[in-house]
Image (cartoon, rainbow, N blue to C red):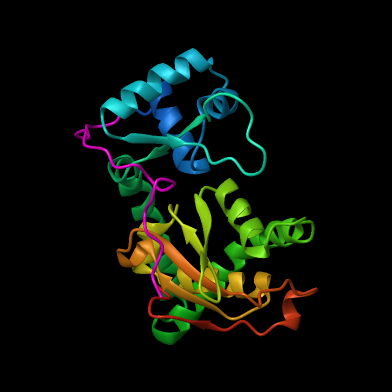
């Protein structure tokens, strides 16, 4: 089974050379940080979120594009499409993400290691990390479950992809033999998940619970793949209670 490939809807490659980001107090840095926190964003989204004019946001985006810290793609439109060209959304490139990850990820990694060591390390430490990862995802899972309860004609996987995109994962769905592939083109915690596989494992468990079926993780960004890919069989359904289903996790790459 093929994994998700980075197509037109994925991050557009850039040939520009990355440079150091603007000072932390600048509006340009706030624009980049907002994209990091919220995922693919239009100029209008950023203007509202940051209290800036769209003209000011576009100037910052032009500078970030020129420096290779941000890239752009057309916004995906579901359902009826109006007249005119589709709006563009902006995403951080690997260079743009790395500019933020160095400090924040190190702090998070140190805290997680302290958590594991505080309970004795070893298997106890791994279980403590897994419990933390599950707890962190539980809040998001409740929101995703609510969205799945009112999904209209969309498949459960498509609704889940929409909810994940709202949280910055730039998720899409592709048809596959015997099911669907849930593709996450961005992972806000990829650098942490590289060191702590419990985060990817907990996420896969949540997907299984939400979709009411065995799911198979085929690839992850944390493992070095271009896209996080999860296979969802065609029999996916939404359970009335997450405790009614027994989540199964498998695949070559739970991290």
189 vs 246: above or below: above
Q: Nearer the viewer, residue 106 or 173?
A: 173
Considering every residue shown, the one lying at the far left of the view is: 17
- Where residue 49 sits: x, y (%)? 58, 28
Q: Position of residue 84 (x, y in %)?
A: 56, 23
Q: Is any part of residue 77 visible from this angle? A: yes
Q: Main secondary structure of the magenta part?
A: loop
Q: Residue at x 38, y 70 (%)?
A: 2
Q: Measured from the top left, where is residue 117 in percent x and y?
A: 40, 75
Magenta run includes residue 168: no
Q: Left or right: 60 with respect to 230?
A: left
Picture mark count: 0
Q: Residue at x 75, y 82 (%)?
A: 244
* Residues rendered magenta in the picture: 1-23
Q: Quadrant of the C terminus?
A: bottom left
Q: Is residue 5 magenta-colored?
A: yes
Residue 48: give x, y in percent of width and height: 60, 24
- In the image, 131 versus 113, the foreground residue is 131
Residue 23 appears in view: no
Residue drawn 75% across and 75% down? Answer: 239
- Residue 30 is left or right of residue 213, and the answer is left
- Which quadrant, please, contains the N terminus? bottom left
* Residue appearing at x 71%, y 73% in the figure: 237
Quadrant in the picture for residue 218:
bottom left
């Amino acid at each position: 089974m093929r994994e998700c490939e980075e197509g037109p809807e994925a991050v557009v490659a850039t040939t520009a050379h990355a440079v150091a980001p603007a000072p932390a107090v600048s509006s340009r840095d706030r624009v980049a940080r907002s994209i990091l926190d919220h995922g693919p964003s239009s100029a209008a989204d950023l203007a509202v979120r940051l209290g800036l004019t769209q003209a000011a946001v576009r100037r910052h985006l032009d500078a970030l594009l020129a420096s290779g810290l941000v890239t752009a793609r057309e916004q995906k439109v579901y359902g009826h499409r109006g007249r005119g060209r589709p709006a563009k959304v902006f995403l951080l490139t690997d260079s743009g993400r790395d500019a933020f990850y160095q400090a924040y990820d190190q702090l998070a990694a140190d805290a997680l290691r302290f958590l594991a060591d505080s309970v004795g390390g070893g298997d106890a430490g791994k279980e403590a990390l897994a419990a933390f990862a599950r707890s962190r995802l539980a809040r998001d899972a409740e929101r995703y479950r609510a969205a799945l309860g009112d999904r209209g004609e969309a498949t459960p996987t498509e609704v889940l992809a929409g909810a994940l995109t709202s949280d910055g994962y730039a998720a899409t769905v592709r048809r596959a033999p015997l099911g669907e592939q849930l593709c996450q083109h961005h992972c806000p915690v990829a650098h942490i998940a590289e060191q702590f596989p419990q985060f990817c494992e907990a996420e896969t468990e949540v997907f299984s619970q939400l979709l009411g079926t065995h799911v198979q993780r085929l690839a992850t960004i944390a493992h070095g793949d271009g896209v996080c890919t999860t296979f969802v069989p065609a029999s996916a359904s939404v359970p009335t209670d997450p405790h009614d289903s027994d989540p199964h996790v498998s695949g070559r790459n739970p991290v």
